[in-house]
Image: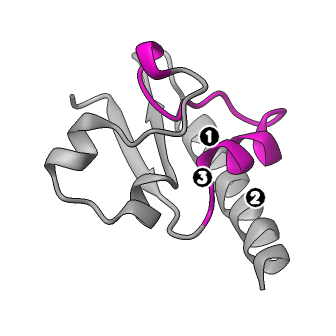
Amino acid sequence: LPSTLNVSFAGIRRQELLHAVEDDIAASVGSACHSGSETVSGVLEAMDIRIDQALGAVRLSVGMSTAEEEVRHAAQALIKGWKALARSVR
């Protein structure tokens, strides 16, 4: 889908990442039918994505009214959350 982006953060659990940025952005870790699940997406599995990458996958969507500033903000929030979690893992 041209309006959907899947980004993976290897070694970081997607639920933890979204929790770290929950006040800054709205994102999803999978389809509604797998909400709250730690299972790997069937699509990512079919693409033979490594498990550590698949478990760190976050799905973002944009719409006609999404502004460039909102995309930049989401990217910065995810990077900030990822860096904080990566530091705590070390």
Q: Residue 70: x, y in percent?
A: 62, 35
Q: Nearer the viewer, mark 2 or mark 1?
A: 2
Q: Residue 10: x, y in percent?
A: 50, 68
Q: Earlier in the sequence, mark 3 or mark 1?
A: 1
In front here: 82 or 11?
11
Q: Residues within 10 Å of mark 3 (few under 14, many from 20)?
A: few
Residue 31 shown left or right of residue 66 in the figure = left
The N terminus sits in image quarter: top left
**Mark 2 element type:** helix
Q: In percent of the image, x 34 and y 32: which residue is there?
A: 4
Q: Which mark is residue 21?
A: none
How far apart marks 2 and 3 lie (CA) works out to 10 Å
Q: Earlier in the sequence, mark 2 or mark 3?
A: 3
Q: In percent of the image, x 70 and y 50: which residue is there?
A: 17
Q: Give amino acid for label 3.
A: Ala
Q: Give amino acid for label 1.
A: Glu
Q: Residues within 10 Å of mark 1 (few under 14, many from 20)?
A: few
Numbered range of the magenta stretch? 12-34
Residue 38 shown left or right of residue 34 in the figure = right
Q: Which mark is residue 69?
A: 1
Which residue position holds label 3? Answer: 75
The C terminus sits in image quarter: bottom right
Q: Residue 14: x, y in percent?
A: 60, 48
Which residue position holds label 2? Answer: 81
**Mark 3 element type:** helix
- The answer to which image quadrant residue 2 occupies is top left
How far apart marks 2 and 1 lie (CA) works out to 18 Å
Instruction: Say if mark 2 contacts mark 3, CB within 8 Å.
Output: no
Q: Residue 23: x, y in percent?
A: 84, 33
**Mark 1 element type:** helix
